[in-house]
Amino acid sequence: MCRVPGVSRSGYYDRVQHAPSDRKQSDERLKLEIKVAHIRTRETYGTRRLQTELADNGIIVGRDRLARLRKELRLHCKQKRKFRATTNSDHNLPVTPNLLNQNFTPTAPNQVWVADSVV
């Protein structure tokens, strides 16, 4: 098992027997906090705003470390989309009449039926 990755037997067992470093453990705790904050902010905050958000919750972390952990977690901000009009109101088709005339309180069932006729 040690031949494939090119690690000596003593090096393998040295790595297996030692506990993770304090930095590794701290990073794992921070990753959990970052995931929670990322979801809480609707996945829209970048590194700088997320750093402020975490600081408001009492978690002090540097911007570069936060960026590295976000990259490891593959967390990205949702990008705003350009507004694109999807309704073409400039047409020669007839406009259907408004038969309801803002009377939204029918007195019996099945008196008023509503449909959307947008093309």
Image (spheres, helix red, strand yellow):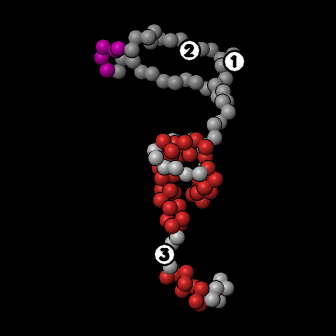
Q: Residues within 10 Å of mark 2 (few under 14, many from 20)?
A: few
Q: Which residue is mark 3?
A: 19
Q: CA distance from mark 1 to mark 3?
A: 69 Å
Q: Secondary structure at mark 1?
A: loop
The x, y position of residue 61, in whole percent, is: 55, 51
The numbered disc on residue 29 is none
Which is more toward the observer, 78 or 48?
Answer: 48
Mark nearest the camera among 3 and 2 is 3
Mark 1 surroundings: few (<14), some (14-19) or many (≥20) residues within 10 A: few
Residue at left 57%, top 85%?
12
Residue name at image x 50 percent, y 12 percent? 98
Magenta includes 107?
Answer: yes
116 drawn magenta: no
**Label whose residue precedes the other's in the sequence (1 or 3):** 3
> Magenta region, mostly helix, strand or loop?
loop
Q: Amino acid at mark 2?
A: Thr
What range of the chain is rendered magenta?
Answer: 105-109
